Amino acid sequence: MNSLYHKAHYQGSAYTLSQLPPDRGMEVAFAGRSNVGKSSAINAITNIKGLARTSKTPGRTQMINFFQLDARRCLVDLPGYGYAKVPEAVKRQWRQTLSNYLEWRQSLCGIVLVMDIRRLFQPFDLQMLEWCRARGLPVCILLTKSDKLKRGAAKQALEKVTAHLQEAFPSARAQLFSAHNRMGVEAIQAQLDRWFELDESPP
């Protein structure tokens, strides 16, 4: 693991766009529906237990949370979206905030879209891909909880997602991932290295 990820630390949170930190440097944002393992993925990638709050109550992440790696690079945990028990007014605010963040944030250099491998391409996932395509943002899809499926079934799910992306979102890529057994951690770290330009300028 690139040692930079283990240096991640909580920088702050924003409920509205006006509360965001200065728009400079490079950010990679993690997006996904509630309860797909987004916070667990961040914790696995950084190898810091509890860095991003995990909860058995879906919809707990209601703010944009920033985890700084160094003076120029940051991981961003976007609000989980789509859980039925979240009030409709909150859903609308999240949707508008996410849309504006994706459209206007100049430091944003990549999106990690987190999907539960057992529940592929929910409406929010497709909306995120559309937003990223409109902005021209590169996307890597993490198929989380891949350990819940047998190897053959997980491979079939990945092939299904890859085929869909090639047809509808050719600039996006997908990979298997499990925070439980660390499947795919090194692969997504390598992708982050490229987005953060760490392969050319080590920390």
Image (tube, helix red, strand yellow):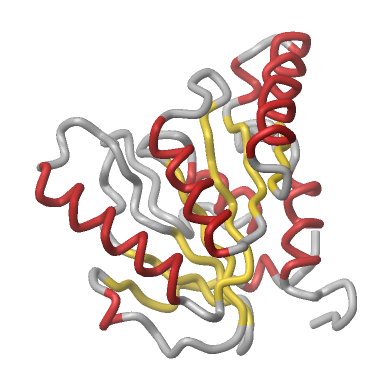
How many numbered marks are there?
0
Point out residue 16 in the picture as x, y percentages from the top left corner. 24, 72
The quarter of the displayed image where residue 137 is located: bottom right
Residue at x 40%, y 58% (from the top left corner): 78
Q: Find residue 185 and report its image quarter.
A: top right
Which residue occupies 48% across, 38% down? 126
- Residues 100 and 58: in front is 100
Image quarter hosting the N terminus: bottom right
Q: From the viewer's perspective, is 115 left or right of 97?
A: right
Is 178 left or right of 103, judged from the image as shown?
Answer: right
Image quarter where the C terminus lies is bottom right
Residue ID at (26%, 60%): 96
Place residue 56 in its image quadrant. top left
State whether residue 57 is above or below residue 149. below
Q: In the image, is residue 52 above or below residue 161?
A: below
Of residues 121 and 148, the one nearer the viewer is 121
Seen in the image, is 143 located left or right of residue 106? Answer: right
Across and down, in percent, residue 48 comes to 58, 57
Which residue is at 73% across, 73% downward? Answer: 196
Instruction: Give the x, y percent position of residue 121.
Output: 50, 29
Decide if residue 85 is on the left or right side of residue 10: left
Extreme residue in the right direction? 200
Q: Nearer the viewer, residue 125 or 169?
A: 169
